[in-house]
Image (cartoon, rainbow, N blue to C red):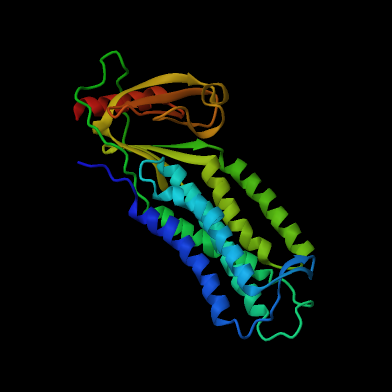
Amino acid sequence: MKQRTFDPAGVIFGVAVPIAAAALGLVAVHVWRTRLPEQIATHWSGTEPDGFMSPSTSAWTLAIVIVLVGGGCSAVAALSHALLSLRRTMLMIGLTVVGLITVLQLAILARQLDVTTVTSVEIPGWAIGVGTLVGFAVGLLGATQLRDYRDRVDATSPPPSTLPRARAELPIVEPIGASRTSIAIVFTILAAAAALTCWLSESWWPVAVFAPIAAFTSSLMRYELIVDKLGIHVRSLGMPAFEYSISEVTGASVREVDPFSDFGGWGLRVKGRGNYAVATRKGQAVFLTFANGQKLTVTVDDADEIAGTVNSLASER
């Protein structure tokens, strides 16, 4: 069967949505052209506008930025064979940028309708927060719709008898990465920074920006490994980063891992084609191999028991 090249949900959210957002700004300028001044404020220094441009030039400039920057990031989501977690992350980042620029652009235009002078127009700071939240929400919705179209191949033989065997109570659920205390500390620091920015800007919008930043930070710092009768699942933000069925497993073993020397860093890593890791500490890790040639390393407690359970399940399939 021919493998799918593009993820339909990725095409809609990662390509069509940025193009539609860019077109929306152009349409708004066209509809409002008789109510806008010949030169609109497009840049501010503090509360005073110091950059001006014709509405059409501004609209085309922002349309290009939306498509190239926001769309350039989010378009990765359309590539069905790219790593699913990467596609989700790029989609959320790209659409957050798209939402921010689009809402801010529309708010700036609306503020300058029917004005006689633009030198006293203030930037609508609220639009920064609203645009960030809207873009992130659309990106998160799109991320939940993406699917993993990687090659799935069933193993033709059980794991070698030399690999460990065990039987743990299923499902096995193991948190991976930073502790809840560490995440709470990071969130507190981010919240303090948002509060300080609110005070300095005398506006609430930094709080809205804080929400997606906190969610992104959580997704990078904490994961969850689940082993059940169906397979192996690594989740982030409640969504699967990796999912393999038990029938795909060719073996599970235990390795000593140093995230930086073995994979070049901490967290979700890729080292060569099909060699993935969720390495969040130095120490024991479960090393999983699959019939399609892919490999997955996950640093966890009780690595021996998890590897043995996976091998036992694979032998019984």
Asked whether 24 or 260 is in front, the reply is: 24
Left-right relation of 128 to 255: right
Residue 148 appears at what percent x and percent y?
34, 44
Q: Quadrant of the N terminus?
A: top left
Asked whether 317 or 136 is in front, the reply is: 136
Residue 169 appears at what percent x and percent y?
31, 33
Residue 129 appears at what percent x and percent y?
62, 65
Residue 274 appears at what percent x and percent y?
39, 30
Tell me what residue is drawn at x 59 percent, y 44 percent.
183
Q: Quadrant of the C terminus?
A: top left
Left-right relation of 165 to 30: left
Tell me what residue is drawn at x 60 percent, y 52 percent.
213
Asked whether 180 or 106 is in front, the reply is: 106
Can I make out residue 46 in this image?
yes
In the image, residue 258 sits, relative to residue 47, either above or below, namely above
Asked whether 53 or 178 is in front, the reply is: 53
Q: Quadrant of residue 230?
A: top left
Q: Quadrant of residue 16?
A: bottom left
Tell me what residue is drawn at x 63 percent, y 85 percent.
35
In the image, residue 305 sits, relative to residue 23, either above or below, namely above
How many marks overall?
0
Q: Residue furthest top?
A: 162
